[in-house]
Amino acid sequence: MAIRILLVDDDDTFRRTISAALTKRGHSVAAAGGGDDALRQLKDAEFDVAFVDLKMPGMDGLELLKRIKAEQPGVEVILLTGHGSIPSAIEAIKAGAYDYLTKPCELAELEAALHKAAERRDLAASNRRLTDALAREANYQGIVGKSRPVRDLIALIRQVKDSATPVLIEGESGAGKELVARALHFDSSRARHPFVVINCAGLKEQLLESELFGHVEGAFTGASKSKEGLLDVAHQGTLFIDEIADMPLPVQAALLRVLETKEFRPVGSTRERRVDVRIVAAANRNLEEEVAAQRFRADLLFRLNVVRIRVPALRERMEDVPLLVGHFLGKNTTAKARGVSSVPPEGLERLAAYDWPGNVRELFNIVERAVLLSPQGTIEPSLLSPGPRRAGAATESLDDAEKRHIAGLLEKERGNVTRVAKVLGIDRRTLQRKMSKWGLSGTL
Ligand SMILES: Nc1ncnc2c1ncn2[C@@H]1O[C@H](COP(=O)(O)OP(=O)(O)OP(=O)(O)O)[C@@H](O)[C@H]1O
Ligand SMILES: [Mg+2]
């Protein structure tokens, strides 16, 4: 095994003899007469092992050792000491030297130390590769986690990513549904084609239709130019339909047709268009319940139901919290700017004692806020306690906000369900369903 050696000694004769001997054994040797020269060579080339003389004019061996360890921590350093300098040799080991030899030393001694050091370097390198591989494994397409639920989730994504069948992703708010949709696309055979997102929440029927299917010029007032639909934009790629439970029924019918025949008609057009698009839909409400309430088409659910992926809530995989926090601190610019790369154990304990209704999004928000409010370079553990959720707190989940809002209205309307439903613009049965879920009562 040829070892790349850097030999640093101010003694010319010693340097020349040892260089020649080691070169003869098949190693590659670079020699330096002092610390500055050594550091210069270290910048231009990679070494496995460095022999460093302890006593040199200018920068001494100990100082050079520290500089080498700072610049190329993988280089194993062997100190060469004169007789009687054992105390500084011990100091050297503490500073990260692999070994030390007392001069004058035999070539055999030198070689033995050299091989041991090189072996250790190889071991360290393969160890690093292993940890890197583990870290990569805990991060699949940005999905971080090692818990059973996350491993199952990733396995399922891998299993279905290359098929063209529609996928329905379910999960609580902030649990990672969009992340899953992206993984399905970016790790698939469609990855080089577009990934297009449309969110149905808050889009009126007409707007959603024209977004999805496009329209021709003059299709409706305001349609002064024809427009390509997102289905066309996503051709050969993936269309991610977010919050599909909010899709108005007529649009659901047109989407069903796309799923069945791959065909659709832009608004105002008589011509059919054909596309090859994989549909991935997400819902944070239970679609069976929506079907029961007649807000969702049973046949559309049936079509979407072929592959159903449930994204686990964070509270079902708490063992991933430290990994997630580490991942977040590694990529978050606030954390980088404030020099924070880890959370103290006491902080992790606090994070573990919370149930995370807002899931990973809430976790990231709380960690970011704590980084911002802590002194530079640290995280103050007490800032990592979300504590009891206050009304309107930034960390409140949508569900809780809705509950609080409805409870407030019920109080205001003295429990009159019909009136509250009217104020909210939802039908009475929906309201009653929500109320019974939360244990709220009222009158008709
Ligand atoms: N397993 C995970 N690993 C790393 N980051 C995650 C993970 N799960 C979620 N996140 C992060 O949490 C945040 C919320 O995730 P995402 O937007 O995918 O959630 P969502 O389920 O679509 O939420 P919503 O229903 O509110 O739209 C994002 O910043 C996302 O990157
Ligand atoms: Mg989302």
Image (cartoon, helix red, strand yellow):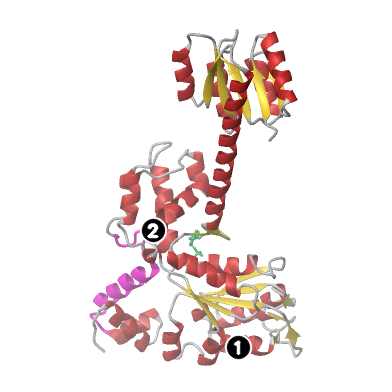
**Bounds of the magenta segment:** 389-416
Give the image location of residue 42, x and y in percent: 67, 26
Q: Secondary structure at mark 1?
A: helix
Left or right: 44 as drawn, with respect to 184 = right
Q: Is mark 2 within 8 Å of ligand 1?
A: no
Give the image location of residue 177, x and y in percent: 51, 69
Quick one: label 1, few (<14), some, or many (20+) residues within 10 Å?
many
The front one of 213 and 130 is: 130
Q: Is mark 1 within 8 Å of ligand 2?
A: no
- Quarter of the figure with the N terminus: top right
Tag 2: residue type? Glu
The front one of 291 and 237 is: 237
Report the residue marked by disc 2. 319
Tag 1: residue type? Leu
Q: Secondary structure at mark 2?
A: helix
Relative vertical location of residue 116 with respect to residue 324 in this rendering, above or below: above
Relative vertical location of residue 432 with respect to residue 406 in this rendering, above or below: below
> Does residue 144 belong to the magenta stretch?
no
Give the image location of residue 369, x and y in percent: 41, 49
The front one of 393 and 180 is: 180
Left or right: 409 as drawn, with respect to 364 = left
* Residue for point 28% across, 82% down: 436
- Quarter of the figure with the C terminus: bottom left
Report the residue marked by disc 1. 256
